[in-house]
Image: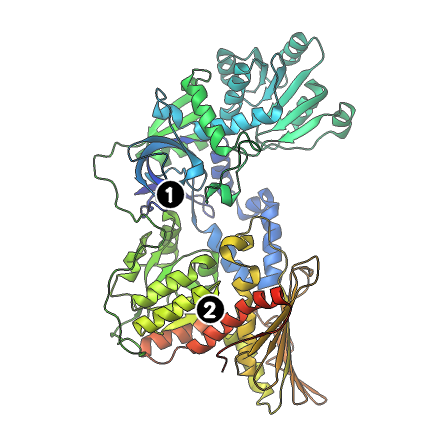
Amino acid sequence: MKQVVQNYKSGELALLDVPAPGAKPGGVLVRSAFSLISTGTEMMKVSEAGMSMLGKARSRPDQVAKVVQSVATNGVPATYRKVMGKLDSYTPLGYSLCGVVEQVGAGIDDVKVGDVVACAGNEHALHAELNWVPKNLYVPVPDGVAPRHAAFGTVGSIALQGVRQGESRLGEVALVIGLGLIGQLVTQLLNASGVRVVGVDPDPARCELAERLGAAACGDPGSASVESAVAELTGGMGVDQVYLAAGGSSNQPVELAARLCRDRGRVIDIGKCRLDLPWNAYYEKELDVRFSRSYGPGRYDPEYELQGRDYPVGYVRWTERRNLGCFLDLIARRSVDVEPLVSHVADFEDAVETYRRLEEGELKAVAVLFRYAAEDAPAVEAPEVTVPKVPELPRPSGRTAPARRSGPVRLAFVGAGNYASSMLLPHLTGRDGVELSTVVTTTALSAANAQRKFGFGKATTDLDAALGDPAVDAVFVVTRHSSHAELTRRALLAGKAVFVEKPLALTEEELASVLAAVEESGNDRIQVGFNRRFAPLLREARELFGDRTGPASLRYLVNAGRLDHGSWYLRQDTEGSRFAGEGGHFVDTASWLLDADPVSVYAAAPAGNEDLQIVLGYPDGSTATISYVTSGPSSFPKETLDLIADGKVLRLDDFTRAAVYDGRRRQWVGSRLPKARDKGQNAELAAFVKAVRTGGPMPVPLESLAATTTATLAVRTALASGVPVTLAGAR
């Protein structure tokens, strides 16, 4: 299928061929009929992509701060790969459309194939021929509403949410600053609510349009006619509400709002304009400044948008989805007329040229629609579940490596997110003896991006394409934590070698299912992404430290830091605890340094924060204390480690510097100067590829992978019980 995309680094716009999405549970697959260009939001994004790197940095200081923090945590090379990977990727455009339901996912019963729906979301209602849309981001289109009008649903919801934030009342007077698409819709909604509207915009054509659609008066922001109209309509008191629907860097809108608003009036920001509030003006009138967050309650909440968990109507009357349905109902009842806003309708095939004309000012428009060609072809066949059933394949007998063919090792990636794109794939691209065969992702564009950047032979959203392909030797599972065990189990049963990013499993039951798949298939070709044991600096330090004769004491401080609000790592109900997700790294590193698997686990957590203190016991009496803290300062190194035994100390500082203390001597590993941070991903991948190619042993024995996972999961039990947990089956 085709989709409109933009490269944020170069500014290039393209109509790209990408894999068709599947109809996953909890949503529907929609074939687009019309999609709407937001001439404000989208064109701002298009213009921003055309800036220099310095211009991009100035426009997004929040992202620059994140880059600086990433450099401190991960080092310059890793951060550079991550940032450039994001910049040099195709990103989608669009967030408002109308289309026809082509497939219905499991758990959906409010629509059927053939129904016409309006869809919302900048990840789901894209300028693309097909979109998968979750339940709370689509609504059926009422009878009598044309599909081209229903395509306004999302921007209509944005305007409607702004009006709700203004708490307009019958008989009030409102000022709408900015008469673009959102401003025109706000004007109509206020007029339908019995509120008289004065509009402000420097474009006379937009002012004339707003007056034709119900505004009492409109004019240029610098003209006296606007102030005169406000004075006449309000008896000199000033307007009750001001809606900021303008964009740009000028502070004129907020200054005008203060001048024309009445005492204790309301100022609602809907657009993205400069907000340097003149303190005296806003203080003296005690103005109430409010923000309107996109489509309404539920926006940016993954449980609402992706998992379909609605808010009870008694607590949240107007949610994102209810706003969408309400706006369509207003169109159906002729309370809002969007047809006069349609400046241009373009065929979808002309999308790139349409954006060019808009950007260069050749096409002046309030609203532009893309019209998609009618499809006479049968519906696209796509899987109806997130993880398709694995096809029946011959199972290898016995725990031996599958026979290797001549030629390169062919790899399939399931998932191509930030970690895969910045820390794994760069080390595999161009490596001798490796062929990137297939990339499988849940979204079409991420698969196409990975194919373009890393040279995969195929890009798809269908897992069967990888698991059922006899040419694929190994499968990389680099997805959300909750899917690791199931995907690993299926890949093992399909006879593939598996590299799964940590964690291997989030529960004891998931771990048991993976081990059962090993028993059933006879295939134990598995590696978990515990890369730190492969870090060159740590391996050199261990060699310099030498063999030990007595028990050791190991201290591992992990300054994990706090996560951003909304991070999927925080979704403990689906993705497990944060330590369950990444704690295996530190358990594995300790066990490798001590050359044994833990036999006991004790854990404690200080009251009032998420810090963990974990003590691992080993067969020879050695102990490893892992301090996993989230409350430490970001300026402190993320990982520091001390191993003490036989009168010697091995010291590791964040994988940039290491030393061994023996008596009165201190021997630096390599050099006293810090090295570039290398946590072992490249060496780990080399070891895995070699094992797959040669049929030799996997880099880490399965027993050790299982023991590390068991110990990591036992932390939860130890916290709950308050006593040490004895681990069964430790070697």
**Which sits in the foreground, 380 or 703?**
703
Q: Mark 1 falls on what kind of element?
A: loop
Q: Position of residue 380 (x, y in %)?
A: 26, 43
Residue 448 vertical position relative to residue 586 in the rendered view, above or below: above
Residue 686 is marked as none
Residue 107 is marked as 1
Q: Quadrant of residue 517?
A: bottom left
Whether the residues at callouts 1 and 2 have beta carbons within 8 Å, the answer is: no
Q: Quadrant of residue 454?
A: bottom left
Q: Mark 2 falls on what kind of element?
A: loop
Residue 360 appears in the picture as rendered: no
Residue kind at label 2, given as amino acid type? Gly
Residue that appears at 30% across and 49% down: 383
* Residue neighbourhood size for the residue with mark 2, other residues' Cα within 10 Å, grouped as few (<14), some (14–19), many (≥20): many
**Which sits in the foreground, 162 or 352?**
162
Q: Position of residue 62 (x, y in %)?
A: 61, 47
**Which sits in the foreground, 96 or 517?**
517
Q: Which residue is mark 2?
A: 529
Of the numbered discs 1 and 2, the one sitting upstream in the chain is 1
For marks 1 and 2, give the CA distance: 34 Å
* Residue neighbourhood size for the residue with mark 1, other residues' Cα within 10 Å, grouped as few (<14), some (14–19), many (≥20): few
Residue 392 appears in the picture as rendered: yes
Residue kind at label 1, given as amino acid type? Gly
Residue that appears at 41% across and 56% down: 416
Residue that appears at 48% across and 26% down: 156
On the rendered structure, is 527 left or right of 564? left
- Residue at the outermost bottom position: 549
Which part of the image, by quadrant, shows the N terminus?
A: top left
Residue 603 vertical position relative to residue 329 in the rendered view, above or below: below
- Residue at the outermost left position: 377
Q: Position of residue 539 (x, y in %)?
A: 54, 80
On the rendered structure, is 290 left or right of 729? right
